[in-house]
Image (tube, rainbow, N blue to C red):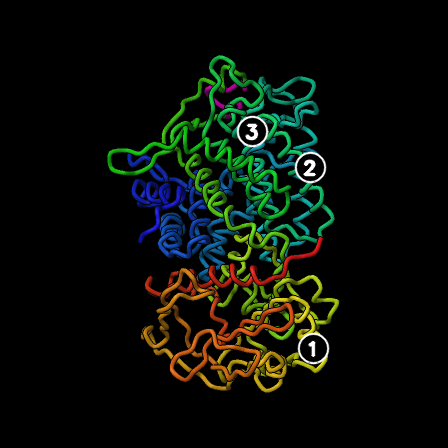
């Protein structure tokens, strides 16, 4: 029985039907590089992460390829405009480079990074919104520039950028936040020369909802890539907390929505607005899911989303769902002049299916779709081993970087999608680059070891010692959940490593079953034909080049094919071990881009993640 499509899937269908080229533009207008596209494509990206459906990734790539030349040039983009809006879509360039490795995306993204280097600044260092808007910082600009800036700095080794990124938020809040309400004014003019600017403070006159929405989305997206150890990270989380409190206080109690001018509910001409409401839902829901905000904000977000779908979502005769109630644009200055007055904001045109409104809705819908499962992983930490698997390579900058089954690696070889599934269930991620001692394992609820190194992979492999095996055994016995993902013969160290799983009745054989040649995917197929206690939603999986298992008590075969044990589970004390002879859930076989749709590896990953988290014993408070 087919499942009813989620709101995000319904909205994506509208996008992919109406904007086949992915530009979000009216067919009558020429295409140009724009931030609207960057917003709704981030929503499509979130749907790809949540479903593993390659159609969404393909749509993103096609949309960017309309603009990105083979040499990395960006059609219609002009660096010399120094318009911070033009940075926004660069986040999709980073995604495409990190997934595909195609150099043109790196070159295009690096062009945008060059714009940031030259972006005009206020005297203290805040980015001007545009070159033609001198000395002005707008809330909008934080979303347009900072998430890209942060991810680029994290991926391409520019740690000095994080101080600059944090200061942009700190300065914006210091200048624009109203002490009484906690809300932030739309814009600030350092020079105080603009007609819209208060001659004492330099601030615009009103609290425009979408400006606050941009600011909130910027915060939660920057925190994704901002280093946990950075001294300014706490300041960013505190800014998010103040933002969330202020936004909750102006939520309409009846509908759960937010007014276009935030602090004037019910005033003549004011109206409940769709894009800002979606942005607030996204920021609050994501902040709560990632544990940057208290859980209570999950319900604030859910109430807001229910209001959005009830008030603004309408089906048309073709069966597509459309988003009503988005103000097309609101700005400051320019020609014709926008004075930031109340009358100005409420008289801007309200439209159907505005691209940035749809993008915000998609982002919000993806977060709300994740809410029901988050209790499964709440308070649980998943730690990935970087000690026995310790491979490095040089990246495009020439620096040596860790790769192969890592959380950060978005290429075929990475575990980024697998990690994302754990986060979708409310768990947090960590790594262990050192010896798995009892003290080190205390932080882990789930510990994952994959593909222990051979000498051809690492100059000095870390082999399992008696002390390592004992520490892991005692940790499992005390309630730890251990996931062992090996590899086939020739690609994995077996003889020393087997000392660890053998304590749980599991031995990995030095063989290689299911050798797949070319696209003969059927060689790697397994059918789950009976009700499975772990893979409850999965019927057909793909695992190639597997080391099979020999098991003794207390291990039990969970999945066998003929005489071969493929998957085993062992219960020891309060803990659980799950073992399979393949890394299995790396991106190449989760992201939908390679395997035919009949293979349900993404569904299998969701099923396994949920089951693993459920095996963690309840903590005694």
Q: Is residue 297 magenta?
A: no
Mark 1 Cα shell of 10 Å, populated few (<14), some (14-19), many (≥20): some
Mark 2 sits on what residue?
A: 170
The answer to which of marks 3 and 1 sits earlier in the sequence is 3
Q: Distance between the residues labelled 3 and 1?
A: 60 Å
Where, by quadrant of the figure, is residue 137 drawn? top right
Element type at mark 2: helix
Q: Give the vertical position of 599 relative to 545 (above or below).
A: above
The residue at 36%/73% (across/down) is: 525
SS category of the residue bearing label 1: helix
Tell whether label 1 touches label 3 (CB within 8 Å).
no
* Dominant secondary-structure state across the stretch colored magenta: loop
Frontmost of labels 3 and 1 is 1
Residue drawn at x 52%, y 82% is 551
The numbered mark at residue 133 is 3
Q: Do labels 2 and 1 touch, CB within 8 Å?
A: no
- Report the residue marked by disc 1: 468
Task: Say if residue 83 shows up in the picture.
Answer: no
- Percent across and percent down for residue 174 are 70, 31
Residue at horizontal 42%, vertical 66%?
532
Q: Could you say which disc has been placed on residue 521 in the image? A: none
Q: What stretch is highlighted in magenta?
A: 331-340
In front of the other: 551 or 463: 551
Position of 497 with respect to 530 (left or right) is right
The residues bearing labels 2 and 3 have C-alpha atoms spaced at a distance of 21 Å
User: Mark 2 or mark 1: which is in front?
Assistant: 1
Question: Is residue 259 something that shows in the picture?
Answer: yes
Image location of residue 406, percent across then percent down: 56, 65
Looking at marks 2 and 3 on the same chain, the residue that comes earlier in the sequence is marked by: 3
Q: Earlier in the sequence, mark 2 or mark 1?
A: 2
């Amino acid at each position: 029985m087919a499942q009813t499509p989620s709101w995000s899937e319904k909205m994506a269908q509208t996008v992919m039907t109406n904007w086949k080229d992915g530009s979000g533009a009216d067919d009558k207008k020429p295409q140009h590089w724009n931030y609207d596209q960057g917003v709704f494509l981030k929503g499509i990206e979130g749907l790809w992460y949540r479903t593993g459906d390659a159609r969404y990734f393909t749509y993103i790539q096609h949309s960017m390829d309309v603009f990105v030349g083979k040499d990395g040039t960006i059609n219609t983009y002009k660096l010399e405009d120094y318009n911070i809006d033009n940075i926004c879509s660069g986040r999709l360039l980073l995604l495409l480079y990190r997934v595909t490795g195609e150099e043109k995306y790196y070159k295009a993204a690096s062009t945008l990074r060059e714009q940031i280097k030259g972006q005009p600044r206020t005297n203290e260092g805040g980015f001007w919104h545009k070159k033609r808007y001198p000395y002005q910082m707008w809330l909008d600009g934080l979303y347009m520039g900072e998430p890209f800036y942060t991810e680029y700095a994290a991926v391409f080794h520019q740690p000095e950028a994080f101080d600059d990124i944090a200061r942009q938020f700190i300065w914006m809040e210091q200048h624009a936040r109203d002490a009484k309400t906690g809300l932030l004014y739309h814009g600030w003019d350092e020079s105080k020369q603009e007609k819209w600017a208060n001659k004492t403070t330099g601030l615009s006159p009103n609290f425009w909802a979408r400006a606050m929405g941009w600011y909130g989305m910027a915060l939660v997206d920057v925190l994704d890539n901002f280093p946990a150890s950075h001294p300014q990270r706490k300041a960013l989380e505190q800014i998010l907390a103040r933002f969330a409190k202020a936004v909750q206080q102006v939520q309409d109690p009846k509908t759960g929505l937010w007014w276009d001018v935030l602090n004037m509910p019910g005033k003549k001409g004011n109206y409940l607005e769709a894009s800002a409401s979606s942005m607030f839902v996204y920021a609050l829901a994501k902040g709560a899911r990632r544990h940057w905000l208290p859980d209570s904000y999950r319900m604030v977000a859910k109430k807001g989303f229910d209001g959005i779908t009830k008030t603004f979502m309408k089906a048309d005769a073709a069966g597509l769902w459309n988003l009503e109630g988005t103000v097309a644009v609101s700005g400051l200055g320019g020609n014709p002049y926008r004075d930031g007055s109340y009358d100005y904001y409420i008289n801007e045109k309200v439209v159907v299916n505005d691209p940035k409104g749809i993008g915000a809705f998609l982002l919000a819908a993806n977060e709300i779709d994740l809410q029901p499962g988050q209790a499964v992983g709440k308070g649980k930490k998943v730690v990935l081993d970087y000690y026995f698997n310790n491979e490095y390579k040089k990246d495009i900058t020439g620096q040596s970087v860790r790769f192969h089954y890592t959380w950060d690696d978005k290429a075929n070889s990475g575990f980024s999608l697998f990690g994302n599934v754990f986060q979708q269930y409310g768990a947090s991620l960590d790594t262990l680059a050192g010896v798995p001692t009892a003290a080190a394992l205390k932080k882990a609820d789930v510990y994952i070891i994959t593909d222990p190194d051979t000498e051809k992979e690492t100059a000095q492999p870390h082999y399992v010692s008696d002390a390592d095996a004992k520490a892991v055994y005692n940790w499992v016995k005390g309630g730890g959940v251990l996931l062992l993902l090996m590899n086939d013969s020739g690609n994995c160290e077996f003889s020393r490593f087997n000392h660890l799983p053998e304590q749980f009745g599991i031995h990995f054989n030095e063989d290689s079953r299911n050798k797949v040649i070319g696209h003969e995917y059927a060689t790697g197929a397994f059918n789950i034909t009976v009700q499975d206690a772990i893979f409850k939603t999965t019927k057909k999986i793909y695992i190639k080049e597997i080391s099979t298992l020999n098991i003794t008590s207390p291990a039990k075969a969970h999945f066998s094919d003929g005489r071969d044990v493929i998957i085993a589970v062992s219960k020891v004390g309060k803990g659980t071990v799950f073992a399979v002879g393949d890394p299995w859930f790396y991106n190449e076989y989760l992201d939908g881009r390679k395997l035919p749709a009949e293979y349900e590896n993404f569904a299998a990953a969701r099923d396994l993640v949920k089951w693993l988290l459920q095996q963690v014993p309840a903590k005694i408070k």
